[in-house]
Image: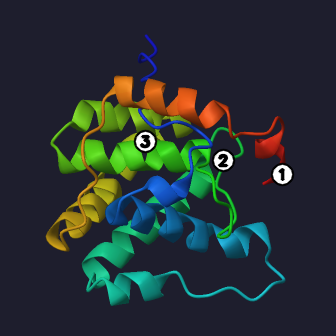
Amino acid sequence: MPLPAPECVYAINAPIAELTTAKLFVVSSVRLWAAPHREPDEPHPDWRGGFVAAHIGAEGIAPFDALLRLLATAARRALDVRCARCPRLGEDEAWMLQLVSALQHGRCAEAELVLNLWMPPAAARMAMLPAAGFAQALSRARLVVALRHREAARISRLSTAAHVQRGLALLH
């Protein structure tokens, strides 16, 4: 029996300028990690620099890299990860925030549902360990992604809708 799909608690295309430091760290790290895969012939900054600056060592770098490698390999669909300069939150960046928050707050079942959105169940089970390692490393560095409720996403979607142009997601 398929697992129920969770509801995203972050509004897609929300302005990233409104994110907290912990959330910006997650989104920018994902974007920087994905950049060489999106444009392999262009020079890109090393995504590990943010981890070093935040005093997150190998205990955060290795699981983050493993999680994103699994995700890139096993994803069922193309992922909405924006370029580093995009001022709006991509769908899968929002899901990554929800994944990290769930793991940091002991909501493993919710985290598993998020992983299952991206990849088949076997790959999702494999991804749980590095995802938890990344979330724990962020917690140790005091980068906690606060729990957010569906109501906050609904309010954010309403306020964001006035600023979003049709087709914006197609540009990234």
Element type where label 1 sits in the image? helix
Q: Residue at x 45, y 27 (%)?
A: 155
Instruction: Give neighbour class at mark 1: few <14, some 14-19, many 20+ (Cα, 10 Å).
Output: few
**What colour scheme has been applied to the protein in the rendered image?**
rainbow
Name the disc covering residue 79, or none: 2
Q: Amino acid at mark 2?
A: Leu
Residue placed most toward the observer, 150 or 42: 150
Q: Position of residue 28 (x, y in %)?
A: 52, 68
Q: Which residue is mark 3?
A: 124
Q: CA distance from mark 3 to mark 1?
A: 29 Å
Picture quarter with the C terminus: bottom right
Q: Residue at x 43, y 40 (%)?
A: 115
Q: CA distance from mark 2 to mark 1?
A: 13 Å
Instruction: Give neighbour class at mark 2: few <14, some 14-19, many 20+ (Cα, 10 Å).
Output: some
* Residue 144, quarter of the rendered image: bottom left
Q: Position of residue 162 (x, y in %)?
A: 67, 33
Left or right? Give the position of 131 relative to 89.
Answer: left
Q: CA distance from mark 3 to mark 2?
A: 15 Å
